[in-house]
Image (cartoon, rainbow, N blue to C red):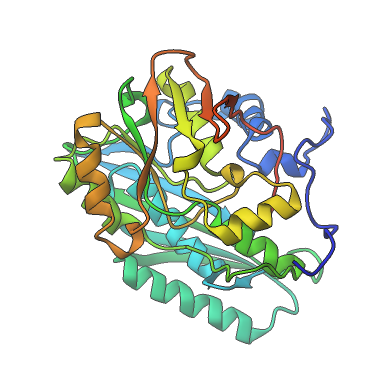
Amino acid sequence: MTTTLAAGLACAMPMATRDRVVLGHGSGGKLSNALVRDRFLPHFSSRALEQLGDAAIVPVDRTQIAVSTDTFVVSPLEFPGGNIGTLAVNGTVNDLAMMGALPCYLTAGFVLEEGLPFDVLDRVVAAMSDAARIAGVQLVAGDTKVVERGKGDGMFINTTGIGLMDSEFQPSPIRVAAGDVIIVSGPIGVHGMTILSTREGLEFDGDLTSDTACLYPLVNVLRAATAGEVSALRDPTRGGVASTLNEIAAAAKVGMVIEEDATPIPAPVAGACEMLGLDPLYVANEGSFVGFVPAHRADAAVAALRQHPLGRHACRIGIVVADHPRTVVMRTRMGGTRIVDLLPGDQLPRIC
């Protein structure tokens, strides 16, 4: 690596404040959970919202649809493997797919900053169009606002997705049970470290390229390989795999044990994290999911995922247990164990 630690890195444990928002409130960790629990849910309580899934499942006539919305504030706007437009499509489509929904429609809202070059905007919109085509979704509504120079950091994008639910396939954290095997469909930490290296001009050994992709086809592979026996799915974006496992352990009231040796962390990610003092388990991903399947389906699930280009590095990383409910522990290479908890704040802000 050929640089010093950049000023843009955020402290993993921000000083708590009681009267204002800090960057850690957007981390997907403890501060994020507190923000939603204390500031939003008391005012917007509903049965659908209280599930706090990747998407809300709501009835429409005699069927159900999944609805998800997400706002993308990634910095920089463009990076190896994609740009903010790619994320805006794939991120929302994947939230629908994690609920077992067929993604169908998107809306997009753009906040553009005065002075944004048109060539950047054109590349972002073209990338969104390509990503939507690959995902098989239509963009059916949108909105554009422009703010003064210095007020929008180039561009922010909000996308809302609508998907059709299948009554026979509805994975959910509350279905996770002791004995389920924990699977990841691909390498961990690639997207977050790509954003960091691009943002800060860091050079590491090995190429880093964002893994952003539409995961719906890979979900279909998993569904077929397990005859639909998939307890839960989640794409580990903000807060990474560690935060995802903690959220599901809390929702299902179970414990989890993961194996350090089994966790697929690419060498460039591991090296970069070691240099910077970061934990790859908390680094964001945009092209892999965490899945929970019954033990008797695990081998077939991993084998099938590895046949797909997006899942060729799929593997087991652990198991769900009845012991220590709501707690995730890791068996380390040294033979010990450590608790994998939610971080108070954010290792890497503005990564999606």
One can see residue 344 in this view: yes
Residue at image x 33%, y 59%? Answer: 312
Quadrant where the C terminus sits is: bottom right
Q: Answer left or right for 214 relative to 44.
A: left
Quadrant where the N terminus sits is: bottom right
Q: Residue 24 location in percent, x, y?
A: 73, 40
Residue at image x 47%, y 80%? Answer: 126
Location of residue 300 by image quarter: top left
Which one is nearer the viewer's eye here, 344 or 39? Answer: 344
Q: Is residue 183 above or below residue 30?
A: below
Which one is nearer the viewer's eye here, 23 or 219? Answer: 219
Q: Residue 302 location in percent, x, y?
A: 27, 47
Location of residue 47 by image quarter: top left
Residue at image x 57%, y 73%? Answer: 80
Residue at image x 80%, y 71%? Answer: 149
Q: Residue 121 location in percent, x, y?
A: 59, 79
Q: Is residue 103 above or below residue 203?
A: above
One can see residue 220 in this view: no
